[in-house]
Amino acid sequence: MGFATSYVMGGNTQWLGVSLAAALAGLAYGFAVWGRKLLTKGGYVEPRPALAASQEEEALLADAAGGPQSPVRRRGLVGLLLTATASLGIAALFPLRSLLAFRLPDPVTQLRRTVWRQGGLRLVTPEGQPVRAEDVTEDSIRIVVPEGHRRDGDAPAFVVRLDPARLRRPPSGGSVDGGVVAYSLLCTHAGCPVALYEEGTGRMLCPCHQSAFDLRDGARPIAGPAARPLPGLPLEVDDEGYLRARGDFTAPPGAGFWSLP
């Protein structure tokens, strides 16, 4: 139960390992109790001939093992065993940091969050030019990134103006200035940029595997292998008319991972 709960809730690898170890330990204890308490007991002896070596054979073996021509000497064997044990001990030190470091950043959390979560970041073009709400039109999209974090690979988004009267489902991140919406630029199938916009239909197309997303229906996938809608980015307009993000994407951007199909 602990392993399943940690997996479903996106627990870190350490807790998954601890819960799995506890489950295996409980299984081993159950087998031990079953063998000692539930199985029938009795002494059963199978008749067989004696297998003990004679005194002459034992003497010949002792001479061969201890002689100068012996392939295995006691001191050499002990040295090899000590060397092998020391090597295993040194090798075991390397994974201890990852196994015991519960305070390291959780990889699942890192995949679910982006720099947009700081809130208040201004939307700028890849060249660094701030974007005003009045500059966003229905004719085309504008690719945007968070100001000061233009190289973050999971942060690119796009903004476009949609006619509110033609929306079949409200945008997941809401809208500002009469229809300006923002979505993640990364396809939810394999993380490719969905930068092809069909103005007449309000659809975004992914050139990699031909997934299509209907922006008028909450960026829901309508074609191709993508299974999740594009995550929305909540917006606000500051006093100077520039677009800013109110927080992170409404869902993890880009391709799925082990706990997000």
Image (tube, grey):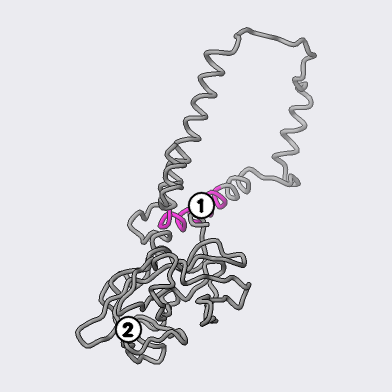
Residue at x 37%, y 71% (from the top left corner): 233
Residue position marked by numbered label 1 in the rendering: 86
Q: Is residue 69 left or right of residue 259?
A: right
Q: Which mark is residue 216?
A: none
The image shows residue 142 at horizontal and vertical percentages of 43, 85
Amino acid type for the residue under numbered disc 1: Ala
The image shows residue 42 at horizontal and vertical percentages of 62, 7
Residue position marked by numbered label 2 in the rendering: 147
The answer to which of marks 2 and 1 sits earlier in the sequence is 1
Magenta segment range?
Answer: 82-99
Farthest top residue in view = 42
Amino acid type for the residue under numbered disc 2: Glu
Q: Is residue 69 left or right of residue 103?
A: right
Relative depth, front residue between 143 and 81? 143
Relative depth, front residue between 176 and 12? 176
Q: Is residue 38 left or right of residue 66?
A: left
Residue at x 36%, y 61% (from the top left corner): 105
Relative depth, front residue between 14 and 87? 14
Q: Residues within 10 Å of mark 1 (few under 14, many from 20)?
A: few
Magenta part mainly helix, strand or loop? helix
- Mark in the foreground, 2 or 1: 2
The image shows residue 190 at horizontal and vertical percentages of 56, 69
